[in-house]
Amino acid sequence: MTGDGTVTALVLAGQRAASDPVAAAFGQRFKVAVPIAGVPMLVRVVRTLLATPAIGRILLSLTDASELEDMPELDALHRAGRVEFAPAGTSPSDSVRRTLAGASTPWPMLVTTGDHPLLTRAMIEHFHKEALAGGADVAVAVATAEIVRAAYPDAARTFYRLAGEGYSGCNLFLLTTPASLRAAAFWTDLERFRKQPWRLIAAIGIAPLVQFLLGRLTLDGAMEVVSRRIGATVRAVRLPFAEASIDVDKPEDLVLAEAILRRRDDL
């Protein structure tokens, strides 16, 4: 922990390509600056982190500092020292690796993304509590297909099928020890296969791939395999929040996220 018992948060907010489809569709230079229900999505993420007592220091991994020019609220927070810049890498995993390698990085570190506008304090607190209780070097948040489809049956999400159950990533990770660096390096190797689950499993080993193809590889079993492969303990935390799995990769994701946020505002 940091000296005051809080957690450092790293927000991955860089843009992978020169032209992002969401940014282009809504006339912005950067995806994370696209407004959702009137507020840029990255601003929503940072507001949530600021409102969460467990979060202390907030680091923004940006491709270009000029991103803040399109978000005056964040620019003001940066000038006031409430948010800081972190080194951006060639990919999200490389950005995490570079930040973790910094001598001043305290543990643990919560990692999320700038295109996660539905993130809430309740999600963070639930994940943080369960992740620390698990005692792993790395905790990964997931939501089951059952929970996501029950709430949003028409939402197009990518689910990883493990032992008959589908899981969606939630763009929330807790890195608790220096062994997390091994996980970041491994993530870099696998990142190009993130939409191809069988190739992710194949990169880990033939036996797990066979189990996966036969429908016998469980989520916890997959985490054990990854742990052995990288030499650090990795655990999955199942979240009870369907919205935790919804980030904004496509224009239709933004439409869904905006509808959810407007419903929240009406409650």
Image (cartoon, rainbow, N blue to C red):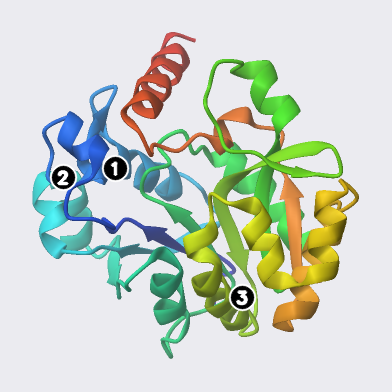
Q: Give the label on residue 71, or none.
A: 2
Asked whether the beta carbons under mark 1 and mark 3 sit within 8 Å of each other, the answer is: no
Q: CA distance from mark 1 to mark 3?
A: 28 Å
Q: Find numbered disc 1 in the image and state the secondary structure of the residue it sits on.
A: helix
Checking the image for residue 259, the label placed there is none
Compare residues 95 and 57 and report the one nearer the observer: 95
Q: Earlier in the sequence, mark 1 or mark 3?
A: 1
Occupied quadrant, residue 96: bottom left
Residue 8 visible in the displayed image:
no
Q: Is residue 93 above or below residue 146?
A: below
Q: Which residue is mark 3?
A: 183
Compared to residue 136, the image places residue 126 above or below, namely above
Residue 194 appearing in the image? yes
Instruction: Mark 1 vs mark 3: give the one in front.
Output: 3
Amino acid type indicated by mark 3: Ala
Q: Amino acid at mark 2?
A: Met
Quadrant (top left, top right, bottom left, bottom right) of the N terminus: bottom right
Image spot of residue 99 (x, y percent): 41, 78
Q: Residue at x 78, y 63 (%)?
A: 223
Q: Which residue matches tag 1?
A: 43
Q: Is residue 210 left or right of residue 95?
A: right
Q: Are marks 2 and 1 in contact (CB under 8 Å)?
A: yes
Up the image or down, 99 lies above or below 125; here it is below
Residue 266, position in %: x, y?
A: 43, 8
The amino acid type found where label 1 is placed reads: Val
Q: Secondary structure at mark 2?
A: loop
Q: Position of residue 243 (x, y in %)?
A: 56, 30
Reading the chain from its start, which is encountered first: label 3 or label 2?
2
